[in-house]
Amino acid sequence: MPKLFLIIDQNQQLYQLIKEINLDLQYEILNGKDKIQEIIDEIISNSNDYLVLTNKTKHNFDSKRCITINKPIKASKLFEMINLIFLKNKYLVTSNISVGGYNLDLNSRTISSGDKNLKLTERELDLIMYLSDSKTERSSFDIRKDVWGHAENVETHTVETHIYRLRKKIIDTFNDQNFLIYKKNGYKIL
């Protein structure tokens, strides 16, 4: 699990205050001093998350990873803001996954490659997630039971219809005939 870092930029008093309060915080507190960009680069290179606290109104920090404090603020409010930003960033990271060479955004239900995006239905997203999590091919029966929750004795062409439509959308948008394939034991995402 990635570590979280709170970097205090150019404010020794705030750094000391937060270090003293340290109410069992879930992140490590760093004093940015004059080498803040080096610290950020190191954190990013180790796939960790960070947040910068600064009192500068003009800065070059990522706005999604920065809190500018330019007036007095209650400590409880500050910690609430810090935790909220860390949660938002974690949510954004976990909602974007790579599947078969494509980026899948679970929040917006889109699949993309380069500058091309395709909107997915909820069922198409469920189907892609199910097949991408599987190490082996999945039969229509497995998909019908696990994704749709249909009983074993129900005969339906729901799976084949949805897969046909999804494959057509992928081919039309990305010109990729090999994203979702059928092998002798069932369907698979490459």
Image (tube, rainbow, N blue to C red):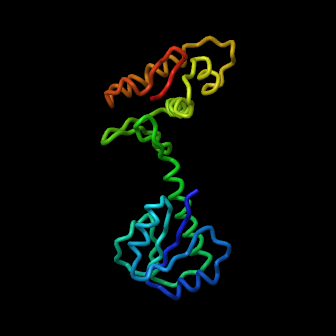
Measured as percent of width and height from the top left, residue 2 is found at 55, 59
Q: Identify the residue at image location x=54%, y=32%.
A: 126
Q: Is residue 127 placed above or below 91 in the rendered structure? A: above
The quadrant of the picture occupied by the N terminus is: bottom right
Q: Identify the residue at image location x=63%, y=84%.
A: 20
Q: Identify the residue at image location x=33%, y=30%.
A: 173
Measured as percent of width and height from the top left, residue 44 is found at 44, 62
- 73, 141: nearer the viewer: 141
Q: How many marks?
A: 0
Measured as percent of width and height from the top left, residue 89 is found at 50, 58
The quadrant of the picture occupied by the C terminus is: top left
Q: Identify the residue at image location x=50%, y=25%.
A: 188
- 162, 128: nearer the viewer: 128
Q: Quadrant of residue 178?
A: top left
Measured as percent of width and height from the top left, residue 24 is found at 67, 72
Q: Is residue 84 placed above or below 29 in the rendered structure? A: above
Q: Quadrant of residue 159?
A: top right
